[in-house]
Image (tube, rainbow, N blue to C red):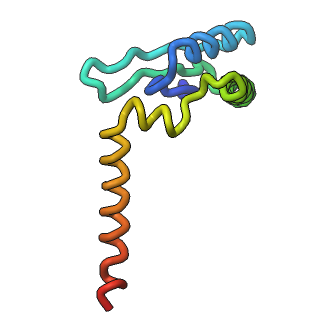
Amino acid sequence: MSILLMNLRHVPEDEAHEVRELLEQEHIEYYETPPNRWGISAGGIWIKHPEQAEQARELYRQYQELRLQRAQADHREARRAGRAPGLGDVMREKPLQLLLTAAGVGLLLWLLLFPFLSL
């Protein structure tokens, strides 16, 4: 019986590649299932032997912590260097999307508060 370690939906290729390398370094046997042609399944990385599943999960958890730390450090560096996008950048690049989002939030708030305001 195989154990799903990682669903590949919305997973960047570099992350999937690093997880494969990690499993190979630790001699954990795995296999991959391809994505479904109709988009129902995105594929996954499966651990072949259930007795290796706990070790694989712990390695994956540690890997995710390190990846998060790297991403946060990269974001802090980008902000420090002025390369991280801010609200002003979003307003310049996608003003219509920002306006429609704000209108949608306003409409939602009005719908939620209308019963109380009409008392």
| x and y percentages locating residue 46 in the rendered image | 54, 21
Which of the pair 38/74 is nearer the observer? 74
Picture layout, residue 87 above or below residue 66: below
- Residue 55 visible in the shown view: no
Q: Residue at x 48, y 22 (%)?
A: 44
| x and y percentages locating residue 1 in the rendered image | 54, 26
Which of the pair 96/76 is nearer the observer? 96
- Residue 85 visible in the shown view: yes
Which of the pair 47/39 is nearer the observer? 39
Q: Residue 38 vs residue 24: left or right?
A: left
Q: Residue 82 vs residue 92: left or right?
A: right
Q: Quick one: which residue is furthest to the left in this view?
A: 38
| x and y percentages locating residue 62 in the rendered image | 75, 27
The C terminus is located in which quarter?
A: bottom left
Q: Residue at x 63, y 16 (%)?
A: 19
Q: Residue at x 35, y 61 (%)?
A: 106
